[in-house]
Amino acid sequence: MIKRLCGLTLLFALVSATPALAQLPSIDFTAYGGVYVPLNDVVEEQVLGVDFTGKHESALAIGGRLTLGLPGPLGVEGAVNYALSDVEVDSAGVTDKEGANVLAVSGRLVFEFGLPAAPLTFFVNGGVAYISRGGDFYEEVEDKSNIGGVAGVGLKLGLPGLVALRLDLEDYIYSAKPTLVDPITGNPIELADSQLQNDFIVSVGLVFSIGP
């Protein structure tokens, strides 16, 4: 009799907890790869009387996203993106290439929408990003990091099980103003003009649901 009462009590507790569990936020992890496409020169200036420009090249991008789905269509997301993108340097008509990389860390709000019970959903997102640059090109450069914004659109296709396919188009928007170092005197050379940057990333990734 006691065992039966205990069993009924446990069953009642599980049934009562089901609505509460359904309200818990969902958690998704996305691992992705794609293409990093910068549109603007990161440096465009005269240095020691010589015209000097530097522009990142398109390159492979890899990264990950952690998405916390809130009740309703809203969610919050953190993302890390890394691109091993060399810089093409043009100085006095002579073109060279130097190694470089770009790391972007961002936090954003996500708004997701789609038809009820449909496996395909669409989303838009936007937020704040921290962009840091490194590599050989930036060895003699100060102020290698910037704060900017990020906006994106995409779609997610549900697959059998707890996996989905996600396609994203993102635009990182920020202003870069590198400070070069004079190779002769060692003094910093602050460039006169900031350069507006638009770094696009087109990516495809696998989404793994790791929460309820």
Image (spheres, rainbow, N blue to C red):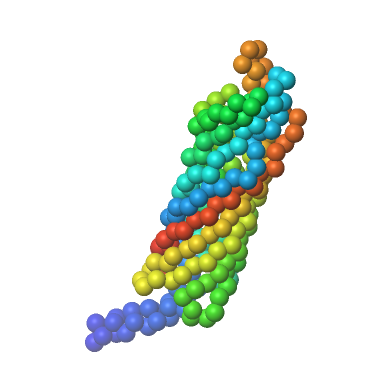
- Residue 73 shown left or right of residue 160 in the figure: right
Q: Does residue 69 appear left or right of residue 193 in this picture?
A: left
In the image, residue 186 above or below residue 15:
above
- Tell me the residue at 50%/32% (across/down): 99
- Which residue lies most toward the right here? 192
From what the image shows, is residue 161 above or below residue 106? below
Q: How many marks?
A: 0
- Give the percent coordinates (x, y) of residue 31: 43, 55
Q: Quadrant of the C terminus?
A: bottom left
Q: Is residue 11 above or below residue 138?
A: below
Most foreground residue, 209 or 50 = 50
Q: Residue furthest bottom?
A: 1
* Residue located 65% across and 38% down the image: 41
Please provide percent x and percent y for residue 169: 56, 58
- Report whether residue 207 is seen: yes
Left-right relation of 53 to 59: right
- Compare residues 3 and 151 and report the one nearer the observer: 151
Q: Residue 191, image x and y in percent?
A: 72, 28
Q: Residue furthest front?
A: 93
* x, y percent for residue 19: 47, 78
Q: Is residue 129 among what the camera can see?
A: no
Quadrant of residue 90 in the image?
top right
The N terminus, quarter of image: bottom left
Q: Residue at x 64, y 21 (%)?
A: 181
Task: Quadrant for residue 92, please give it.
Answer: top right
Q: Residue at x 60, y 26 (%)?
A: 94
